[in-house]
Amino acid sequence: MVDSATAPLRLVLAALRPPEPAAGQQLKQVSVLFVDVVGSTAMGQQLQPEDIHEVMDGALERFSAIVQANRGRVLQFTGDGMLAAFGADEAHEDDAESAIRAGLGIIEEALRQAPQVRRAHGIPDFNVRAGINTGTVLLGGGVDADGSIRGAVVNIAARMEQSAPAGGLRISHDTYRHVRGVFDVAEQPPISVKGIDTPVRSYLVERARPPSFHATTRGIEGLQTRMVGRDRELDQLEAAFDAVVADRSLHAVTVVGDAGLGKSRLLSEFRKVREQHAPSCWLLLGRAHPRSVLQPYGLLRDLVSGHLHISDSDSAAEARRKLVEGIERLLGEEGEAPAHLLGHLLGLDFSSSPHVIRILNDAPQIHDRAFEALAQFLRGLAASNGAPVVVLLDDLHWADDGSLDFVRHLLKNNRDTLLLVLMLTRPDLMERRADWIRGDSMHTRLDVAPLDKAYSNQLADVLLQRIAQVPAALQTLITGGAEGNPFYMEELVKMLIDDGVITTDAQGWHVLPDRLLKVRVPPTLTGVLQVRLDALSAHEKTALQQAAVIGHVFSDQILAAIDPAAPNALPVLLSKQLIVRRDAASPDGACEYAFQHNLLQQVAYDGVLKGPKRAGHATVGRYWSTRAEVAGPHGVNPAACRALVEAHFHCCQSDPQAYVGWFDAQFFNYLNAYAAQTLRPLADGLIEICERHFGSEHPQTAKALTNLARVMFMQGDVESAEPLTRRAITVQEQALGPDHPDVALTVAVMGGHFYGRGDWGVAEPFFRRALAIREKAFGAEHPLTLSSLDILASTVGELGRHEEAQQLSRRVLEIRERLLGPDHPDTWLALTALGDVLSKKKDHAAAEPLIRRALVAQQKNLPAEHPDTGLSMWNLAEALHGLGRLAEAEPLARGSLQMWEKTLGPQHEWTAWSLSSLARLRLAQGDAAEAARLAERALEIHQQTLGPDHATVGENLDMLARSLLAMGDHAAAEPLLVRTLAIQLGHLPADHPTPMATRQLLALTRGQLLQR
């Protein structure tokens, strides 16, 4: 009967729940509150259903409001009661306290309702009982996913309620440990709970105590404080520095401690000592930030930029100039290559540099050589004047993986350098990198623990030094709740000053003891900071929350974009030391500010309601997206990359669906500017966003998959890219149909993957399909159609179908000449491509004039030593070789080799092509020994860049074997021919002329060996 009477309340509960879809199942620590109306069975026997409904509906509705008022959420109505959880939606450090206050409020509300229930319905003793337990539960899932909560914690909470007296609130010991000292309680005899082995300790809550105080800090305006309790740690850092000087070798220290324990203060004191005492040293500082994980090598960039005075406001050209000049100032002319490689890794786009272009598509090599460049720079710094180098890295727990990898590289490879690497981190880093310190005698861990009681009292004395006589209650208040955390203690003193408990004037500080009783200090940092925020006026608090939406660092200009009146609150926020002003100002005159601590920003942000939060992110997202939007690859610079990262974060918080389309429009500009490092985490994150908002089988998700695959291909991560591309094709075919242009792009990307591996037979159908789709969608002369036609011609040529390749290449050349003119770079490439096809067809006479025409145009119009010019030289040498004009071919072949070695690098794939070509030429000229040396070097490069089974590797093996045979070394040639034949048969049919010729040569070689 009670259930039927309270059925309407279930509709109330549904209305109270947030409109967003419930999250999936999750394990989470919460405080569970059970409430039960006492005597509901007897009430059902005395009253009609309508009367029961009136009593219970009104009561439970008021009880629900009390739960909501205390940041709890009602999960279930139980007929004559309810179940609520505190911390289910958003955890707070005082969730247990909130649950207790809600329970006491419900009991008090029941007592207020009792007289009315007695008068209206004749029920003499309307009352409730309540129980609370705290621990980990499973939220979500099941039939009633929104209201589902499971675990032993729930059973114990129910037992607490069942065993509580009428009008009483019983809490478990697990709840009591979170609120010790906040409430007056009476411990009860342990009680048994079904399914729990040992009796459970519990307490009856009598009343809330008068507010007391717990503590925290980090500097108080106008108060000079000394460091307390960290002399031992500072001595260890000094000892590490002395060891660097004495051993003339690297030492590293990782300082580990939770937030607020004084790591940054320790770093500051160490810097002060080093700046004031001999011997002098180089100091380099890098600091990670919460979103550093989205900025590849962001910590390294901060380190380098700080030392070389490179700012985000610098143009790309200015940033590159400062980097190069700074490194060359130290390393001399030899510093150019390290500067370009390091700059490219850090996102400064040195893609046109001769030191970078030759390895542009070899991400691992860029990574390794850039790491060595920075390590070399630090070695040079130490060697420049004999002074040790001290690298200080703060907040390492937020650092991106690439920067962490560099630190490991540095510690491994710079061991003989006068270098101290001092790193500060929270324990989170050890969860990401469990082996961060393990097994390295030169790398030590220094744990920063909470201050003990004696040091806590010393710090309280320092913080309260301007009070003539500190009341014992105040001393206890400051030291009792902080649990040895200096930041907690400082923040508490700040809040006491803000609240007027401590007054300040020129004569000193004074305490108002009567106001101490009115102060309640939450037991955690979140609580302390939230109390400070709540003490602000509505306008000040709103402005701070709007700034928190922007991020840890914000400008008054962006803040004004959210709310024009918000910057007016900044002077008050500065005076209350909630924010600090940064020295750097942006070029447009905006002033930059930062939150006093990242945790303060997070607490302020968590307090913003969803509507204003989403609107704020939308405004900030528009601000950054405007700055990230570029007209073409030439507009991509470090500032644009930073803006793109910021736009990604904020737009994804406000309107991710709209952002996806904007990102697609900008993606190609950034990809073509070689900003793969910036793009990869963003493209990766967009897949999850597309799956969530559009569905895993939506075309937009497929496009996101393709974008990430293209970034991976650019970085050389083909193994990760291939499954993404296949999945994208499947999704697009099902959603758009097999002939959609988007399918053509993804199919072409997949074909390019196989082409690069030398699997031309596998690649061909992908390119043909892309061509067919584009011809149908765009027409036969569209640039995308010609691009597909061009790569198809190259593919069939590699497969030995030279007539077909010739027809396709001529078609591309004819259209490009007609549409673009004879002097367009695409036309020159088409000339070279057709010449290459004719050479492979052995029609060298027809190939020569085409390639010469392209070469002349390129030499006239392209920069000196441009790789495309080298390509035409190489093709022309091949044609002349085929015509028997070896003397003319040799300088061209050597010229292309020299050009590619210089511009692309000695280990580049194209360099190996030129080596192989020159080897064939020298063999034909009778110099088998040089031919063998050239072929062996080409083989080594191609095996490394293309893999051991690539068709080109087979060609190199064949060339080396023939050179050895010409030298009479049949024994060395025989195994090479065996490998050659195996590779050829992996790419070509057995009756193809190429493997047939190899098989015949192998038989002759073995015959020669048998005759010996």
Image (cartoon, grey):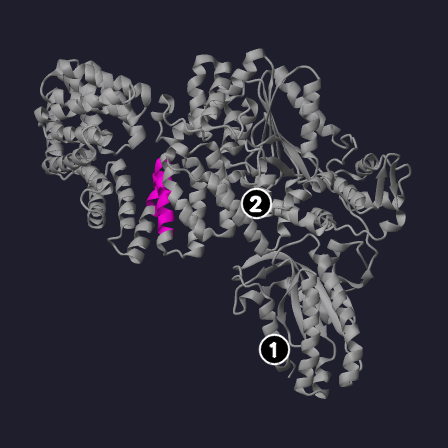
Mark 1 crowd level (few <14, some 14–19, many ≥20, 10 Å Cα): few
Q: Quadrant of the N terminus?
A: bottom right
Eye-nearest disc, 1 or 2: 2
Assess whether mark 2 and mark 1 are in contact (beta carbons under 8 angstroms).
no
- Residue at horizontal 82%, vertical 46%? 500
- Residue at horizontal 72%, vertical 69%? 161
Q: Quadrant of the C terminus?
A: top left
Q: Element under label 2?
A: helix
- Residue 8's disc is 1
Q: Nearer the viewer, residue 232 or 591?
A: 591
- Residue at horizontal 51%, vertical 33%? 298
Image-based side of 794 in relation to 218, left or right: left
Mark 2 crowd level (few <14, some 14–19, many ≥20, 10 Å Cα): some
User: Could you say where residue 320 lies in the image, as x and y percent from the top left?
Assistant: 46, 24
Q: Nearer the viewer, residue 560 or 548?
A: 560
Say if the magenta span includes residue 404.
no
Q: Residue 124, relative to residue 982: is it above or below?
A: below
Q: Residue furthest right?
A: 469
Q: Nearer the viewer, residue 239 or 292?
A: 292
Q: Amino acid at mark 1?
A: Pro
Image-based side of 82 in relation to 827, left or right: right
What is the chief secondary structure element of the magenta stretch?
helix
User: Could you say where residue 139 lies in the image, as x and y percent from the top left?
Assistant: 57, 61
Magenta span of residues: 701-724
Q: Element under label 1?
A: helix
